[in-house]
Amino acid sequence: MTKLLLLQKLKNDDLKEVRDNFPDLELLTADQMTDDLVDQIEILYGQFSKGQGLDPWFEKLVHGGKSLKWIQMISAGIDFLPLAELAKRGVIVSNMSGLHSEAISENVLAYMLIFNRGLKKALENQAKQVWDLGLTGIKQLQNKKIVIFGTGAIGSAVAKILQGFDVTVIGVNRHGTELPYFQQVITHSQLDQVADADYLISDMPLTDMTRGYFDSSFFHLFKNKPIFINVGRGPSVVEKDLISALKDETLSAAALDVVEHEPLDADSPLWQMENVIITPHSSALIEHYYKKSYQIFGPNLKSYLTTGKLAINQVSLKEGY
């Protein structure tokens, strides 16, 4: 009997659907797990414990489950997985790419408007009961150049949501292939073409190529003191270089949903910088998450149990996304 470990909750109607359609599938939760079951689990759904952080059973299965064949992640990123080891063991992995795209794009737009319209300072003034019209650095989005690093589901959703603002949206990826919602797509070797960018947005996954990508030499390519927004991966940024670029006004501001080491150290200078917005890796939060995540897991489960293959969102363990 195939055993499935549910570390991600299923809504009652979805759980009933699974039980009705696959009566021979044995469903287990973390509370039911024991060490002798580790080598019997074939399918793993989710990775987090009831609190924060990776579930201990997830760690045990990923690193040593002898029967493990498929991991359905509940995140888009898979950079913390031992990809080479999983590939060697023949384990396939799928993610939730696309599920969070609209939510993240709304966060990106919010960051931009908060900075542009002086809302960060206005909210600080409100907390102090101060009425002050002297807000500085007010801008509009119109006629600005926005460069998005990463043109997958998230980058495309950001480009789409910006269509109503009369902006120029340029994507950066490895191929430079033309895509919807982007006026232009360039490769990483063509950044000289966007040196006049007003906003730099990263949603790139963490790979060998993207680790430390945003460093001092990168930030100094740009001449318009752009705003930097990171909703991708924290380690893609060299944090000390980012702090220096903010201090010397190479960058005018930054919005960070991810940081190099999470949670951000209490003594990090980023906390105290007036031109920085920090959110706790929360841009991917969505309404009705359990139901929407099942819209990916459900079809994959059906496909896997009937054909041994996945329907959607299988990731490349070689590429890392």
Image (spheres, rainbow, N blue to C red):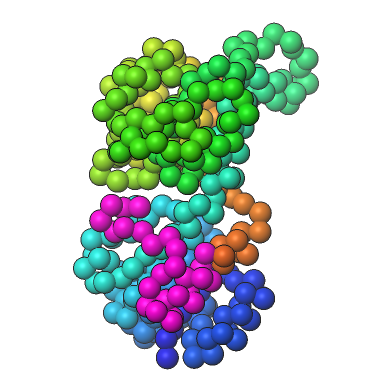
Residue 79, image x and y in percent?
34, 52
Q: Nearer the viewer, residue 320 or 192?
A: 192
In the displayed structure, 45 sits above or below 176; it is below
Q: Is residue 294 visible?
A: yes
Residue 199 location (% of width, % of height): 48, 23
Closer to us: 193 or 81? 193
Q: Is residue 319 above or below residue 224?
A: below
Looking at the image, which residue is at 69% across and 8% down?
Answer: 134
- Tell me which corner region of the image, top left, top right, bottom left or bottom right, holds residue 250: top left
Kindly give the residue lying farthest to the top in the view shown.
134
Drawn side of residue 244 relative to residue 291, left or right:
left
Quarter of the rendering containing residue 51 = bottom right
Magenta stretch contains residue 298:
yes
Q: Is residue 90 above or below residue 147?
A: below
Q: Quadrant of the N terminus?
A: bottom left
Residue at x-position 43% and y-position 19%: 197
Above or below, 37 against 111 in this view is below
Judge whether residue 149 is colored magenta: no
Residue 300 pos. (x, y %): 47, 70
Q: Which residues are magenta?
A: 296-321
The residue depicted at 48 percent of the width and 38 percent of the height is 180
Q: In the rendering, at what x and y percent does residue 139 appear? A: 61, 15
Q: Which residue sits at x=25%, y=65%? A: 87
